[in-house]
Image (spheres, grey):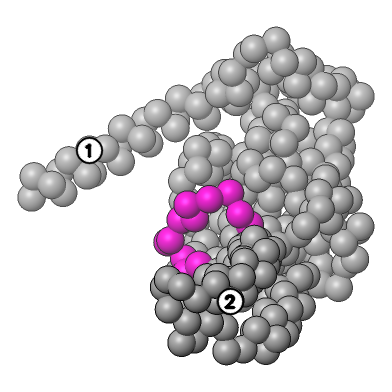
């Protein structure tokens, strides 16, 4: 019983704290609603300048939420309720908000997405399928664009150059499978120019229970061709056939450890091939390294997890 009391007390403290943020957002509403469309759009550049000067994003949060609420009212005809403001702060903090169907989850998501996009490092909105990704992007995209942010959608079949452009947007709508496979492909890329994603910063996940629990039971598996290991194995095979009957370290079968000069001479001939073989063998091992999940590499060689 003591545990339950502590748990519910902690939840109540969270609710009180979230209500304070909603009150602060309401206090900004008269000032923000008095701005014209151009001035409202200019708030994004103002916020970014304040961040560049060292102001904390958490300090900007109530005003940024007020700007998002006003943009929603003007562009979509929907004004965020106080409870939606509270839910938006929960998502902004990287936690899970449980909401019923029809309570406005898609609208709530605009609050943390806009606030996090102010940093300029890109925000991913992750959905379960292409239809929802496109629907939500087309529905909420006008709100973000009215505030000067770029919006992109990753759909199945996009070329790498198109994917790179979409991932470069301020806000990117994408399915969990597409973002996962793009991440794996980036980790298999040999050149920087082949990468499509930029550094990962913040993701908001729709239907989080389905994506992180149900679908997480099926691993994402990807494979690619090795660039040089196959031909190296052929070289080893040819070398082994040519030197059949002799030991690599320099002694013929049957040669004694002393007195048999021919064995030592032959060993000297073989020894010249030792270094190239060792080098080729190492490169073959290093070209592809696969490890199960949870096993960390001990070197800087590229690693593919499965």
Q: Earlier in the sequence, mark 2 or mark 1?
A: 1
Give residue 92's quadrant in the image.
Answer: top right
Q: Residues within 10 Å of mark 2 (few under 14, many from 20)?
A: few
Q: Which residues are magenta?
A: 291-302
Give residue 35's quadrant in the image.
Answer: top right
On the picture, is 20 further left or further right than 243? left
The image shows residue 49 at horizontal and vertical percentages of 77, 15
Residue 292 on the magenta span:
yes
Look at 31% across and 32% down and name the residue there.
13
In the rendered image, which quarter contains the C terminus? bottom right
Q: Which residue is mark 2?
A: 262
On the picture, is 175 further left or further right than 11? right
Residue 251 on the magenta span:
no
Name the residue at the front extreme. 259
Is the residue under label 1 in contact with that under label 2 (CB below 8 Å)?
no
The image shows residue 226 at horizontal and vertical percentages of 73, 73
The image shows residue 155 at horizontal and vertical percentages of 81, 67
On the picture, is 223 further left or further right than 246? right
Judge whether 146 appears above or below 235 on screen: above
Q: Residues within 10 Å of mark 1 (few under 14, many from 20)?
A: few
Find residue 9 and name its label.
Answer: 1
- Helix, strand or loop status at disc 2: helix
């Amino acid at each position: 019983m003591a545990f339950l009391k502590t748990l519910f007390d902690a939840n109540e403290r969270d609710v009180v704290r979230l209500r304070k943020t909603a009150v602060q957002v309401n206090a900004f509403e008269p000032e923000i609603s008095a701005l014209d469309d151009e001035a409202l759009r200019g708030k994004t550049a103002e916020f970014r300048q304040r961040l560049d000067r060292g102001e904390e994003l958490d300090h900007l949060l109530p005003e940024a939420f007020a700007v998002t609420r006003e943009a929603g009212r003007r562009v979509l005809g929907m004004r965020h309720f106080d409870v939606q403001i509270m839910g938006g702060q929960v998502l902004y903090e990287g936690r899970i908000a449980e909401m019923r169907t029809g309570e406005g989850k898609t609208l709530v998501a605009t609050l943390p997405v806009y606030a996090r996009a102010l940093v300029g490092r890109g925000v991913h909105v992750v959905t379960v399928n292409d239809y929802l990704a496109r629907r939500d992007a087309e529905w909420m995209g006008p709100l973000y664009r009215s505030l000067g942010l770029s919006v992109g959608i990753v759909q199945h079949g996009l070329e790498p150059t198109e994917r790179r452009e979409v991932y470069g947007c301020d806000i990117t709508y994408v399915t969990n499978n597409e973002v996962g496979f793009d991440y794996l492909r980036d980790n298999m890329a040999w050149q920087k120019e082949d990468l499509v994603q930029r550094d990962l910063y913040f993701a908001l996940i729709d239907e989080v229970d389905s994506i992180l629990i149900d679908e997480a039971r099926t691993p994402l598996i990807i494979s690619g061709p090795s660039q040089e290991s196959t031909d190296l194995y052929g070289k080893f095979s040819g070398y082994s056939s040519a030197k059949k009957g002799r030991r690599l370290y320099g002694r013929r079968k049957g040669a004694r450890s002393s007195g048999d000069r021919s064995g030592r001479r032959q060993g000297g001939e073989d020894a010249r091939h030792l270094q190239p073989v060792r080098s080729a063998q190492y490169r073959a091992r290093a070209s592809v390294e696969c490890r199960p999940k949870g096993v960390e590499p001990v070197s800087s060689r590229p690693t593919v997890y499965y």
